[in-house]
Image (tube, helix red, strand yellow):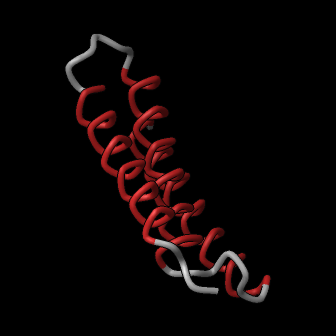
Amino acid sequence: MQLTSRKLTGTWLLLIALTLTSAGLGSLELSEELLVFLVLLTVLIKNYQIIDVFMELKNAPLLWRGLMQCFTLFIVVAVGVTLII
């Protein structure tokens, strides 16, 4: 399946918006736990977009897509636990 430029542009804009959101969260006066959670949530969403759209694994065999998504989830959880401890 070939991606349209509209889909790629929309995904790119979403990634930019999430990056700016992550950067902007640092200027808010939030608790450290909430800040870590929100930033890691944006990271998780961004990685799923990259996996599904740019790497084109949305229609790939479940094993490959699942491995990539599990790896992303593992890294986000590991970083989150490390920062909260």
Image check: 60 left or right of 37? right
Q: Is residue 25 above or below residue 40?
A: above
Q: Relative to 60, is 43 on the left or the right?
A: left
In this rendering, is residue 45 above or below 2? above
- Where residue 80 appears, as percent x and y from the top left, is 47, 44
Name the residue nearer the viewer: 5 or 53. Answer: 5
| Residue at 56 percent of width and 61 percent of height | 48
Task: Classify 35 as above or below 20.
Answer: above
Q: Position of residue 43 (x, y in %)?
A: 44, 50
**Extreme residue toward the left, this view:** 27
Look at 73% across and 81% down and name the residue there: 59
- Where does the N terminus fall, quadrant-wise? bottom right
- Residue 77: where, in percent of width, then height? 55, 52
**Residue 19: quarter of image:** top left
Q: Is residue 12 left or right of residue 56?
A: left
- Whether residue 7 sits left or right of residue 68 in the image: it is left
From the viewer's perspective, is residue 73 above or below residue 80?
Answer: below
Query: Which quadrant of the figure has residue 69?
Result: bottom right
